[in-house]
Amino acid sequence: MSAVPPRLQAVLDDFALMPDRNARAEYLIEIADRFDAVRVPPEVAQRPYDERHRVPACESEAFVWALDNPDGTLTFRFDVLNPQGLSAMAMAVVLDETCSGAPLEQVASVPADIVFTLFGKEISMGKGQGLMGLVSMVQHAARQRLATG
Amino acid sequence: MSDIASRGYAHPDKLVSTDWVAAHLDDPNVRIVESNEDPLLYASGHIPGAVQIDWVSDLNDPLRRDYLDAPRFEQLMSRVGIAPETLVVFYGDKNNWWACYALWVFQLFGHTNTRVMDGGRLKWEQEGRPLTREVPTYPPTVYKAQPRNDSVIRAFRDDVMRHINANKPLVDVRSPAEYTGEKLHMEGYPNEGALRGGHIPGAKNVPWGRAVNPHDGTFKTAEELRAIYEQEQGLKPDDDVIAYCRIGERSSHTWFVLSYLLGYPNVRNYDGSWTEWGNLVGVPIEK
């Protein structure tokens, strides 16, 4: 199995060193503040979005698009309809900043449980599943591109 | 007459407005409690003076699947400065879904001097009211809790089985896709924490969010709520009702609506919900 994208591994290493829950939350809020940079542009999709892009089980109503790059990699774009869905926004920013443009084999290897490294093991089951759904959508898109060449 | 008082609720006093909360920020007899679905929201800014109560780390037993016991509840109350006589006002994201859950758990310990802030975080933010990142501290209180009473507003799986056999009404407050079991069959995605999809036989599907106005998170009027639960779904005020969802959080919102806004006296929340029923061996399931 391929390693995860190095940029993602660096983020995971950072979070593994977080001293406590409050520090982790502060860092994730800073990341979520960058969400506008990864929001799907209107030339790609406009509301109401195609339901095929909806993240299953995400209570913040997150959507994911995988856009083809000339070099065969993917750029990921997102929307989170719930304006209070900070966790989904932070997860989307992490995924874009670390997986967009990365080799597909690496993106396909990203395990959904990185959610617990980023958000902590105390996250609720429902929230964890929604965030894992976001990761799975990205991973699934990479696998599909690999399968179809 | 205030907006809330004009909506025809059975217990309008169980709700407070954002205006009311703004006027009681410094009231020593009031503790404002934020309880959210999103774990980052409180840290990103909250109502000045509000404390956070987290469902996972504060209200659950750390080992067993159960709520905290009375000694832990006492410790929690002391930590956030709540005395037995304190009026506790809950609010949060997702149309007060977790706020209602926290209120329900408080009620298990007999702390009924509680309110929900109508509209929750959404309305407070829409109105441009202040938020702060400053985490308040309060002098510890001495709180002697009643033993947790699970017999009145909480249902267990055996209660649900008896309920089915007696043809009494159940309300499944999950989304239609969860109710039909469709969500469990999406290949490549995390499942919903259950081995089987579907719903408890006879349950009516009324997604919890139908009880609120999506534009500002306020509760619908009693007339609008009766149209959903009574005219459309056939519930009656004197029914013995059990509500459930996936883990009991969304159904506590419906429990609040039926109990306090419509005044049904016999409503219980089955917190085992689908993560228990959908994994139980041999129990009946409908699709």
Image (tube, rainbow, N blue to C red):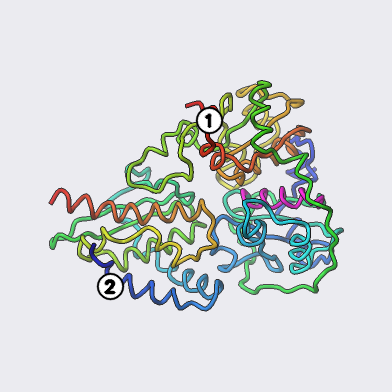
Q: Residue A63 carries which label?
A: none
- In the picture, measured across the screen, residue A108 lies left or right of residue B223, that is left
Residue in the picture at 52% in, 70% down:
A25
Highlighted magenta segment, given as a residue range: B97-111
Examine the rendering and report whether any part of residue B127 can be seen.
Answer: no
Which residue of the protein is positioned furthest toward the front in this rendering?
B281
Residue in the picture at 74% in, 37% down:
B259
Q: Which mark is residue A6?
A: 2
On whether residue B102 falls in the magenta region, the answer is yes
Q: Residue A17's quadrant in the figure? A: bottom left
Identify the residue under disc 1.
Answer: B282
Residue in the picture at 77% in, 73% down:
B138
Q: How crowded is mark 2: few (under 14 residues within 10 Å), some or many (20 or more)?
A: few
**Residue B248 vertical position relative to residue B199 in the rendered view, above or below:** below
Examine the rendering and report whether any part of residue A99 can be seen.
Answer: yes
Give x and y (percent) for residue B49: 71, 68
Type of the residue with mark 2: Pro
Magenta-colored segment: predominant secondary structure = helix
Query: How far separated are the C-alphas under marks 1 and 2?
Result: 47 Å
Residue in the picture at 80% in, 72% down:
B140
